[in-house]
Image (spheres, rainbow, N blue to C red):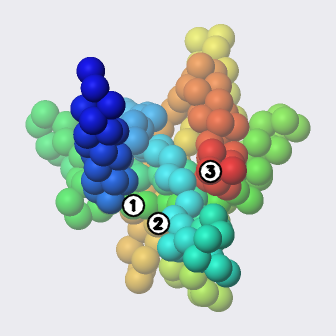
Amino acid sequence: MSTNDESKLDKAIRGIGLILGEVKTPEHRGPTMNFYQAKGGQLQFSVAPPKYRPTERSRPEDAGIAWASKMGAVFIEAAPPIPNSDPPRLDWANSKMVFAMSDKDIGEILWGFSVKSPEIRLIHAPDEKQRENCKTFRLKREKDYNGSPQWSISLTEKKNGKETRVSLFIKGPDVMRLKTLLEGALPYIMGAHKT
């Protein structure tokens, strides 16, 4: 191969690199961790990283820095079952609830696990009318079932006098899955994967 051919090849590779650098890759929804019971509904947990503003540079030759414009979160999406549906179906269209767990919320849950708290409760309320409009995530240790420990996990939304609730029973392995997800998600939602 001549040096002329190599320079053409180098130019082509650089051109492809420039094109690929400009192509915006679509955002994909990551996998979810699901908890489901036909009579209780479904809770699914997904992890989202922070959103960043465009890179700021003090001089054109600087590498620059991108500031987080929105922090990451662990999202809980939940849907209750449709009453009397056969086969059982979930009401994602009319009763879907979303709860965004911040780093502080995750800390509350992990702390509750570490001190073996019998109940962990997170309440998100947009205003002073907490009893009228709020979302509550709850994880509570219940009585053993057939000699095995069990917990109830629930998400409740009160909005304009209407209450929607998804409540399930989970066992020890499910609690460990949730704890592992939250421990792993904490650095990610804080943007540690970008530093």
Furthest residue to the top?
Answer: 147
Labels 2 and 1: the sequence-earlier one? 1
Q: Amino acid at mark 1?
A: Met
Indicate which disc residue 50 carries.
none
| Labelled pair 3, 2 in contact (Cβ < 8 Å) | no
Q: Splitting the image into 4 quarters, where does residue 66 fall? A: bottom right
Q: Is residue 145 visible?
A: yes
What is the CA distance from the residue labelled 3 to the residue labelled 2?
A: 34 Å
Q: Splitting the image into 4 quarters, where does residue 174 fall? A: top right
| Labelled pair 3, 1 in contact (Cβ < 8 Å) | no
1 sits left or right of 179 in the view: left
Q: Amino acid at mark 3?
A: Lys
**For mark 3, what is the residue?**
194
| Residue depicted at x 64% and y 60% | 102
Labels 3 and 2: the sequence-earlier one? 2
**For mark 2, what is the residue?**
157
What is the CA distance from the residue labelled 2 to the residue labelled 1?
A: 7 Å
Q: Residues within 10 Å of mark 2 (few under 14, many from 20)?
A: many
For this rendering, which residue is in front, 171 or 180?
180
Q: Nearer the viewer, mark 3 or mark 1?
A: 3
Labels 3 and 1: the sequence-earlier one? 1
**For mark 1, what is the residue?**
97
Q: Amino acid at mark 2?
A: Glu
| Residue depicted at x 47% and y 44% | 45
Furthest residue to the bottom?
Answer: 128
For this rendering, which residue is in front, 18 or 34?
18
| Residue depicted at x 61% and y 71% | 61
| Residue depicted at x 76% and y 42% | 110
134 sits left or right of 31 in the view: right
Residue at disc 3, secondary structure: helix
Furthest residue to the left?
Answer: 86
